[in-house]
Image: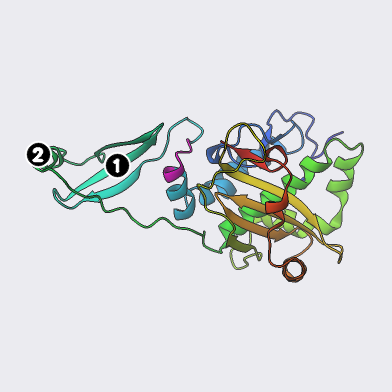
Amino acid sequence: MMLCIFCKSDTRDSVSIEHIMPESLGNTEHVLPRGWVCDGCNNYFARKVEKPFLDSPFATSTRSIMGVPNKRGRVLPTQALHPQSRSILELFRCEGGWIVGAASGQDETAWIRSIRNSKGGSFWLPTPTVVPEANVHTARFIGKIALEALAAQCKDIEGWNAELVSHPTFDPLRNYVRLGAPAITWPVSTRGIYDRERRFNDHAIEDYEILHEWMILATDGGEYYCVVAIFGVEFAINLCGPQLDGWNAWLIAHGMRSPLLDAPSKESRGAGK
């Protein structure tokens, strides 16, 4: 019998597969098989855990700039001001450049007249949010990824579903992700570790960008941390309790270098493009 790794219910009738990272962040391959997360938790997480993070200024601005499509295959536009015509524009990233036009609901005649009558001009773009806000939405989202990333590492080991579900160490984070606690923000270490548009190689034929990556880090103190990078921003969360002392000690011992930067290959790091 398979049990949901979050609510511990019987999942024999569940049909959902669970994306460890949402499809709207470019993940199509890294999923948990049917039955590891029940249909109820899967649907709840999509609405109450993933959507608030995906709607955050960090996620919306970065997805737009990086040209990452949502589940429907649509790339979010970036809005800009054209001061010469006082028009709000929308910029869509596409292969090889940008498509520019008047924003939905805007009168495009002033914008068209301005570009026809002038030899130059400028766009004013809002400064993108570099690091997301440390709040309950971020903590629950990273906590969900952490528990699912741990399950992904264990899913091929016989008996690990029962072991993971019954392990009381993970119950506090499990319940925090499932039920939330508006007055409490589970601590998450957040920092940039590389430019979001950095190109990697790792001896591959072509350079590539990394959209997201993750790993499980075991410390000498017996704690387990999930270290996640999304668009070059590193998140670290303790699966064993709401504290980061072990993570901070590990960083100091390793010269503050992210363990993700030493991962051997793109395949073991997550998804790229």
Q: Secondary structure at mark 1?
A: strand
Mark 1 sits on what residue?
Answer: 90
- Please tell me which residue is depicted at 42% across the width and 43% down the height of the picture: 64
Tell me if I can see residue 239 in this picture: yes
Mark 2 sits on what residue?
Answer: 113
- In this rendering, position of residue 113 left or right of residue 101: left
Q: Nearer the viewer, mark 1 or mark 2?
A: 2
Quadrant in the rendering for residue 112: top left
Q: Secondary structure at mark 2?
A: helix
Q: Relative to 48, say whether 76 is above or below.
A: above
Residue 41, image x and y in percent?
A: 67, 42
Report the magenta residues as a range.
Answer: 64-69
- In this rendering, position of residue 170 left or right of residue 198: right
- Please tell me which residue is depicted at 87% across the width and 63% down the height of the picture: 222
- In this rendering, position of residue 142 left or right of residue 157: left
Residue 235, image x and y in percent?
A: 63, 57
Q: Amino acid at mark 2?
A: Arg
